[in-house]
Amino acid sequence: MDKSKIREVVEETVRRTAITDIHTHTFDPAMGGLLLWGIDELLTYHYLVAEVFRARPDMAYSDFMSMAKPAQADIIWDELFVKRSPVSEACRGVVTVLHSLGLDTGSRDLRAYRAYFSGQNVRDYVERVFETAGIRKVYMTNDPMDPAEGPLWEKGFDRDSRFLGVLRLDSALINWPEGAARLQRMGYRVDSSLSGSTIKELRRYLNEWCDKIDARYMAISMPPEFRYPDVESSLTTLMIKAVVPVARERNIPVAMMIGVRKLVNPELTLAGDSVGCADVATVEALARDFGDVRFMVTMLARENMHALCVAARKFKNMLPFGCWWFLNNPSLVREITAMRLELLGLSCIPQHSDSRVLDQLIYKWTHSRQIIGEVLGGKYADLARSGWVASRQEIERDVNLLFDGRSIE
Ligand code: RAT
Ligand code: ZN
């Protein structure tokens, strides 16, 4: 191939390769109201809820939080799209979605957008979004302890094979013994002290629910203080005595998302979490001591990203993934992607979308594909300058390695 074309070919390949999105908060359409979509959901995304208070410091948190969703959406639209230009990443995302759907972003007409969405049927809209975003499959985040979600699984439904199950562990494990009380209510014989039958019963919970949702991996988000080894910590004990053995037995990965400081501003609820620097030595020690278990790892602090790449060079059972939450911004995705390619080659999962609203699949992937394509294209151009010109087939093969999700299967 012509050397000067190589960037273009890589960018184009990244644009059209079907993606397996390994971490989202979207749901199988059969799960009804849990699947969020449409303009009011897009506008009240918690990333934008945090931003609206930057524009309206006079507004009381509780006043906004107690409003109905359309009223919140009206304020966010007015403050962040009409009175000022939507330059933040989360704001631009809404614009990308509207534009990709063929709506007139020049009209600035929220009522017209609402009318468009109210004319959609959810099943057809899922097809449209998957098609527009170029998505093959998405992994959900499934919490059996969620009062809206648990009963749906208990009852059972016809699954859409494109929405894969992931057992989320936070409500069972974080802030133990809060999870113990929930487990007891579900009929598991656990107690707060981690003694007696607790570990055995927690494993039973994990196994039964992995079966029920056909979990492809188990996932947990953790505070920056998470340490291993740490004999004092309930979370660490539960991880190594229950989660790790179940993952090993089932041959599924454990995803650890580390570095969230929950509710630094409780009044902001879901939008109130912050970031802290985590301990990369902890994930190295876990990967070393449990070498037969696969760990998918992402961290929330930019400061952790370099050390995490180095850690993955040392442990073949560690897979860095995604640019999570506050890192999912073009400048940081660019930096992190380049660093990963330089240190790990193609052995990482560059991005997940974290979409909470179905339509976000469109913007999160349009934006990420753009940056990842540019960075990756630069790497093939560098290679060509060094004397190695990749063929189209080789480029397609490589892009698939990054995006088809096979490394976690
Ligand atoms: O990015 C987000 O939407 C966060 O609220 C979290 O859901 C985070 O991604 C998580 O999975 O904990
Ligand atoms: Zn998430």
Image: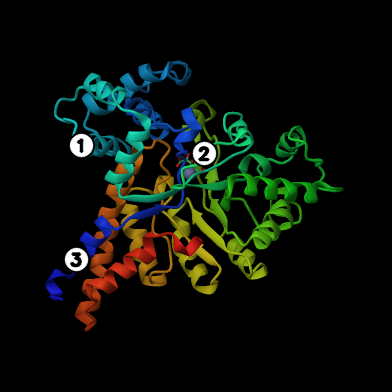
Residue 248: give x, y in percent of width and height: 66, 62
* Label total for image: 3
Q: CA distance from mark 1 to mark 2?
A: 33 Å
Describe residue 133's horizontal placement relative to residue 185 as left or right: left
Verify CB contact (< 8 Å) between mark 1 and mark 3.
no
Res. 83 visible in picture: no
Indicate how the structure is coloured in the image.
rainbow
Residue at 32 percent across and 55 percent down: it is: 18
Q: CA distance from mark 2 to mark 3?
A: 40 Å
Tag of residue 9: 3
Looking at the image, which residue sits at the far right? 196
Image quadrant of residue 190? top right
- Sooner in the amino-acid sequence: mark 2 or mark 3: 3
Q: Which residue is mark 1?
A: 99
Q: Nearer the viewer, residue 182 or 175?
A: 182
- Sooner in the amino-acid sequence: mark 1 or mark 3: 3
